[in-house]
Amino acid sequence: MGVHWVFSDIRLALAMLLLSVVLKIVYSMWILPNITYLKIKRNGLSGPSPRFPLGNITDMVAHSNKTDDPSSSSFDNNIMSHHIHSKVFPYFAQWQQSHGKVFVYWLGTEPFLYIADPEFLKQMSSAIKGKSWGKPSVFRNDRKPMFGTYGLTMVEGDDWVRHRSVLTPAFSLPNIKTLRNLMVTVTNEMLDRWTSIIKSGQQELDIESEISSTMGMIVAKTTFGMKYQNGKEVLQKLREMHQVLYTSNRYVGVPFSQFLSRRMYLKAKSLGDEIDAHFVTIINDRIKLKQSGRLGSTADDDLEKNLLDLMLAGHDNTKALTTKELVDECKTFFVGGHETSALALTWTLFLLAMHPEWQNQLREEIREVVGDEQVDVAMLGGLKKMNWVMSEALRLYPSAPNAQRQAKSDIHVGEVVIAKGTNIWIDLVAMHHDSSLWGDTANEFRPERFETDLYGGCKHKMGYAPFGFGGRMCIGRNLAVMEYRILLCLILTRFSFSLSPCYSHSPAIMFSLRPSKGMLLMLQPV
Ligand code: HEM
């Protein structure tokens, strides 16, 4: 009798436990997102109808497959059109036609507010400080192997303030100027290799992988003082992880999707752990070197100060970042610092290959401003036309194609209330190509539009945001601009280039905006 009671008590307890788990799941994955959705809809915003449990993912995949289909008329790979929004975000382009520039769509059971309206963005941004923004929690798991948990792109609130204030001085102009020598050395190594390749009779090169490796080595050396072999290994693992995570559908936002793609997540996690181990060793070695007082004491490359040393400068005070936080920042800078910058330069070389007249103008400007001197950081500011070209390349092909936010409290934008918890997706590609903002030449390469106006004559200043906006704007933009100018100067003074007949124009979103079939250029020494 007694035993029977004990068993039925256990059964009851288990049933209650199961019920509470199920209720919790239903509440967090269905009821809560729907409450948020209803609040957004109450503002009169519409959007494509979602279907449980995939939301609008099926439509997104179908639109993407249609555009990738070689028989589809929506985008011809052989035509070098810069009209790329409907190619890279076909579903957003389609939904914009029915629902306007602000609407709601669903990734699985997570509603997202889509924004491609600069006035809406301006009002939303001015209502909120950087500290009060969140980042969509639904991306946390997905991006953890790449950026960790505590990198600047992921942290929120007071933690974000602490990280940003420790890291900002590391990106000051005087500090990043000290990285110039390493950048020149690594770039010249790449260009010497190009010369040998051309001498051996080969003229065609995949510039994307060349620039990406070189920028990776620059980040590895300038940021962490990594030795060549270590830098190469981390780069290799990051590339593998990128391949694992961003070339297949991961069903982000769909309940239990991590179990559906379990092998993929385990592979990404193990690569992430291996990269972490590299960084832990580098950080601990650097702390020891710092404590020994040898850092910066000789002309030795390894002892030259790098970005990690600048991050470690605050290591002894109360705001200091812990080793785990530093590891995640290292990963963040490795990925953020190399990929976006490499792509900005890759797309620039593509545009210049299409426009030899602009190659000549830039070469002429370099001759006038820099002459036969060594590339000097102070002189780089005088390269005005190069600035216009960079701005125009980042407008047509923004390497970071979107920005994301999450509302941590209700935000009022005119009559609209963006409810606490709402995920927000800002489509930079759409705004950068919007003819109502840029006129009839929106999809043409016209660097001169930036001659008299930092915003390229865009009718709304928030319509041009290649480095993001507000307090969470890109922390590395000064570094990126300096690196871009140094590399482009050195490339243009040694080579001229044109598009290879084998190049196929296939811009695609693989986290960043990439040429998905590489960037084949024909090179000639100048
Ligand atoms: C051309 C090159 C680059 C482009 C186009 C670019 C673009 C962006 C964009 C669009 C954002 C999001 C801003 C927002 O959400 O409002 C961002 C954030 C960020 N970028 Fe960059 N970036 C570049 C280079 C770099 C470099 C060189 C580094 C570091 C070495 C870097 C580190 C970061 C970090 C850490 C954040 C997060 C900032 C925060 O949330 O406080 N980026 N970047």
Image (cartoon, rainbow, N blue to C red):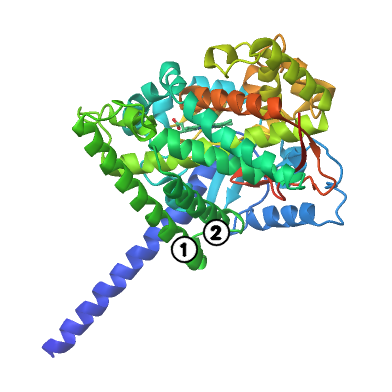
Residue sitting at x 59%, y 42%:
212
Q: What residue type is labelled 1?
A: Lys
In the rendered image, residue 120, in percent from the top left (x then y), is placed at 61, 25
Where does label 1 land, which residue?
A: 267
Q: Give the CA separation, mark 1 to mark 2.
A: 8 Å
Q: Is 257 left or right of 116, judged from the image as shown?
A: left
Q: Judge whether 319 appears above or below 268 on screen.
A: above
Residue at image point 51% right, 63% down: 264
Give left or right: position of 106 versus 163: right
What kind of residue is marked 2? Val
Tag 1 and tag 2, C-beta contact below 8 Å = yes
Picture layout, residue 197 above or below residue 491: below
- Name the residue located 24 percent from the left edge and 32 percent from the top edge: 290
Residue denoted by label 2: 244
- Residue 199 drawn at (x, y percent): 73, 43
Seen from the viewer's position, the closer of residues 194 and 144 is 194
Q: Which residue is the extreme one toward the left? A: 2
On screen, residue 379 above or below 501: above
Quadrant position of the N terminus in the picture: bottom left
Q: In this view, does 350 lie to the left or right of 341?
A: right
Q: Give the class, few, some or many, for how many residues have Cα within 10 Å of label 1's Cα (few <14, many ≥20).
A: some
Please state which of residues 267 and 438 is positioned toward the viewer in this rendering: 267
Determine if residue 180 is in view.
yes
Residue 287 lies, in percent from the top left, at: 24, 37
